[in-house]
Image: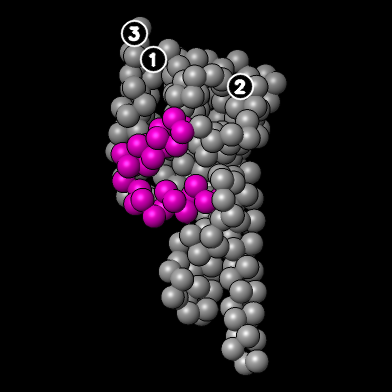
Amino acid sequence: MSIWSRITAAVSALTQGESLAAVFEKLRSPPERSVAFTIAVIALGAKMAKADGQVTRDEVKAFREVFQIAKEDEAGAARVFNLARQDVAGYAEYARKIKAMFADDTDTLCDLMEGLFHIAMADGEYHPDEDAFLARVAEILGLPEAKFRRLRARFVPDARPDPYDVLGVDHSASLSEIRGVWREQVRNTHPDRLLARGLPEEALKLAEKRMIAINDAWEEIQRDRAGADAHRHL
């Protein structure tokens, strides 16, 4: 049974007039957390699409990139998207339900935010309303502002990303300390780790983007430190 069949079953189990937010109450057990994760990204993505006033083809394409939606599963994905867009429940209620489900699993909550950033940037623009939306979602999920800034640095090209922000390390940290953080993030980005956290296989493309950003940041810091050392010895 594919994840999309399980999503369709979960949505179909809602009673007449019941909010999509109720789905998260029914998907608390670990085997179904990947279903909940996927619904969460689609549902919050739909709410975010309303935030900037339009749903573009690029945003729909971004959903496909994250979840690799097969042709036969498009109707199920569209149903979840439209349910969320029309739902009287606000995005804050969705975010609170998701926070209750994943509790202190910060890594999975960051995975969720990465999916939303990917969708927000799909049309090449980062709307101020999208930034406000994502900042509020991150706040409800209990993610520190520094983590939010780090995620935004990876996705939003409004300025050259600070490699220290990307890795979440202080500028004064030693190279060995930074290396330790980089290695830990590489380990945590391994597909096996993501699947163990309940991230569906369909969403592993997010990890590819994260790995590139992590490695680029580490290489830039090494170059900068080596250049600074060479300058001091002149």
Q: Amino acid at mark 2?
A: Thr
The front one of 234 and 157 is: 234
Q: Secondary structure at mark 1?
A: loop
The front one of 47 and 192 is: 47
Q: Position of residue 234 (x, y in %)?
A: 65, 92
**Compared with residue 148, is residue 187 higher up or lower down, i.e. above or below?**
below
Q: Quadrant of residue 51?
A: top left
Residue at mark 2 to residue at mark 1: CA–CA distance: 20 Å
Q: How is the image coloured?
A: one colour
- What is the magenta range? 128-154
Q: Position of residue 205 (x, y in %)?
A: 63, 44
The residue at 39%/55% (across/down) is: 146
Q: Secondary structure at mark 3?
A: loop
The front one of 122 and 28 is: 122
Residue placed furthest toward the right = 71
**Compared with residue 92, is residue 74 higher up or lower down, i.e. above or below?**
above
Report the side of 122 relative to 169 (left or right): right
Q: Which residue is mark 3?
A: 17
